[in-house]
Amino acid sequence: MISFRNVHDISRMRPIIMSWSRYVAMKNGMLGPFGPIPCWRCLLSTERGQTTMNVFDRKAKRIQRDRTTILPDYKVYEYLKDEVGFRVADRVFDVKRQFNVAVDLGCARGYVSKHFLKDVVSTIYQCELSEKMLRQSEVSPEVPTFRIIADEEFFPFKDNSLDLVVSSLSLHWVNDLPGCFRQIHNALKNDGVFIGCLFGGDTLYELRVSLQLAETEREGGFAPHISPFTDVRDLGNLLSRAGYTMLTIDVDEIIMKYPSMFELMHDLKGMGENNCSWSRKPMLHRNTIAAAAAIYKDMYGDEEGVLATYQIIFFIGWKPDPSQPRSAARGSGQVSLKDIDKLNELVKDLGKLSDNKDPGKKN
């Protein structure tokens, strides 16, 4: 286990880990990821017209993750994150390249990096907010792995030091998501890649609707009990504005069945996915919960149980490099899409045109 406080004592990490004093200054608000800021009360504004929204209580989220580690059967609740972590790792395997230095950001129990092999990654750094959860993380049997206690909002790596950053179902609890993307972008080397996923806007919509209807009926209004999630279009815009190129975004939906709403909420707590927004209510009345369970059963259930939808948004973004392919200049096309039905004739005409330009070319 490596806490960030003594990381600078490890000579092997000096080339990629920023100094402890700089990290503390950045985390305490005296230093932003792009330079000094006046004080911790000031909102971090990295672009004109953009401010950081403080939606989530990060301390509460760390405590929630810590509590999952004392459960004797915590592995029972890992079915979703294990599956999604494997899908992220599978996308890494699709890139035919060996990455020297990789970071698993918000690694939890190593759902992604435990699948890496030595022919894909040479060194792995697992970063997690919860120290207790990080102690339970699984590592690759082939790749040297270092564990670092670090907050996703304060990326502790030097600029141009990483080849690969992965993250699985962790960034939806980050307050400053655009700033997090930019910090990762800065830490990547040219032609480095950021591969990850987070929950989409339709995640647990059944639970959200049921709680809102029940709370409105019983209490005359409702409070947010489900975390706000990112939309596909918003995610693409955020990645583009952070400087990533050759973006690839796709969406998977995982639908699971539970005996009732209560088992679903119990499993979410076991995953450490409790609500941690500052505006959350401290409690739900018993009759409101009973009404929500009945509504859930009536609207989204059958005799066997109730359905729960998890929308997973996967993304891949690259740091720009001159070696990367670029789109052709506007107006340089030689074939119109309206002539696609004449493809064979067009190919022959283009072949004759190239022969006329190079008379010495042999057939």
Image (cartoon, rainbow, N blue to C red):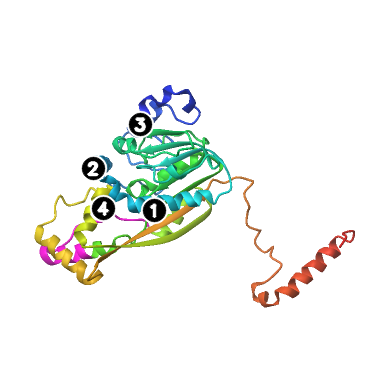
Q: Which residue bears the numbered disc 3? A: 30
Magenta residue check for 309:
no
Mark 2 crowd level (few <14, some 14–19, many ≥20, 10 Å Cα): few
* Residue situated furthest right in the rendering: 360
Label 2 vs 4, first from the N-terminus? 2
Quadrant (top left/top right/bottom left/bottom right) for the C terminus: bottom right
**Image location (x, y in percent) of residue 92:** 50, 48
Disc 2 marks a residue whose amino acid type is: Pro
For the residue pair 189 and 175, the one nearer the viewer reads as 189
| Numbered disc 1: secondary structure | helix
**Whole-number angstrom distance, CA of label 2 to CA of label 3:** 41 Å
Disc 4 marks a residue whose amino acid type is: Leu
Quadrant (top left/top right/bottom left/bottom right) for the N terminus: top left
| Start-end of magenta stretch | 210-230
- The image quadrant of residue 210 is bottom left
| Numbered disc 3: secondary structure | loop
